[in-house]
Amino acid sequence: MIQLVSENNYKLNMQVKIEPYLERKRVIDSFESFDGSLISYEAYKAKGSKGAVIILHGFTESAEKFREASYYFYGEGYSVYVPDLRGHGSSYRTSQKAGTVNGNDFDDYAKDLNVLIETIVRPAEERKPIYIYSHSLGSAAAILYMEKHPDVIRKAVLSSPMICGNMGMPVPVAYTVAKLLCSFGGESVSAPGRCKFNPDMKFEKSDATSKARFEYYQEKRVNNRLLQTNGPSFGWVKASVKARDKMLREVYRIRTPLLILLPEKDKQLLASYQQKFISGVKGTKVIDIKGSKHEIFASTDEVLKEYYGHIFEFFE
């Protein structure tokens, strides 16, 4: 069982022990993707590794948010690769607005992942198995990739997988509005009221249940403009609905064993579409994580012990 970074003195432990340790092991680089875009990533290469774990973060997040997770996977003997998805972190952006995530095709995430695997991970790890640990939007990218490349990933964890987001209104209405605006050249227009970063965001309104973990990354966001993405463009909203339909339509193509971890309370995603996906894929293990919100990885210590226990048992 992994030794968790305790919520007690969490910030001190991360700053004094975990972050400096990871910095000594970390390689930060970028690769040119299929369309010439530069995608940034972090890598932690373990000697004699069990295989490679690719961590795929969620919407408006970054590789930096998953430093604690990287520490655990690396500590268990895996090499770890964590890209900033396009439109996030230090990777290529089409939007110059700091708070807006743009993008007109979710397949681009899957194509970026393919380039990462074929040009970075495979050459470094040779014939060792490749695993995926993904959260929310990262799970959508993983699903789209596995539907097209069913024999590459040994096992995949989908944590709070995004099949369809909660748009604050009926999905058909949101899609119709987005499609209409995009037809008039509004692909990059920010969704109103969603894209402004709030430096005073309160823990109680967050998707975390660990105040220490929430506050640690929130402070990083306040001090780094590249981490302040906060909402979608209308082009991204339109693309997300098209991706939902594709994920559900082609779910039968997935042959990778999946572990799906679902939070007890999730205000960001629509559970009905998750269930449609789950019912369409064979060999899937589904576990409900009590006492968690959308960001299960930002839960209390007690919840995380169970959470990572399931993950490492599944990988082993």
Image: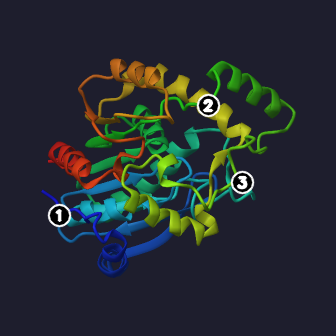
The residue carrying pointer 3 sits among few (fewer than 14), some (14 to 19) or many (20 or more) residues within 10 Å by Cα, namely few
- Residue 59 coordinates in the image, percent (x, y): 54, 47
Mark sitting on residue 3: 1
Q: Where 292 falls versus 122 (above or below)? A: above
What is the secondary structure assignment of the residue under circle 2? Answer: loop
Query: Does residue 250 appear anywhere in the picture?
Result: no
Query: Does residue 70 appear anywhere in the picture?
Result: yes
Q: Nearer the viewer, residue 151 or 54?
A: 54
Give the quadrant of residue 229. Answer: bottom right
Q: Nearer the viewer, residue 292 or 164?
A: 292
Residue tagged by mark 2? 167
Q: Which one is closest to the eye, mark 3 or mark 1?
A: 1
Residue tagged by mark 3? 94
At 74% from the left edge and 22% from the top edge, which residue is drawn? Answer: 176
- Residue 3 coordinates in the image, percent (x, y): 17, 63
At 41% from the left edge and 74% from the top edge, which residue is drawn? Answer: 27
At 31% from the left edge and 42% from the top edge, which residue is drawn? Answer: 157
- Give the left or right position of residue 162, taking residue 182 as reference: left
The residue carrying pointer 1 sits among few (fewer than 14), some (14 to 19) or many (20 or more) residues within 10 Å by Cα, namely few
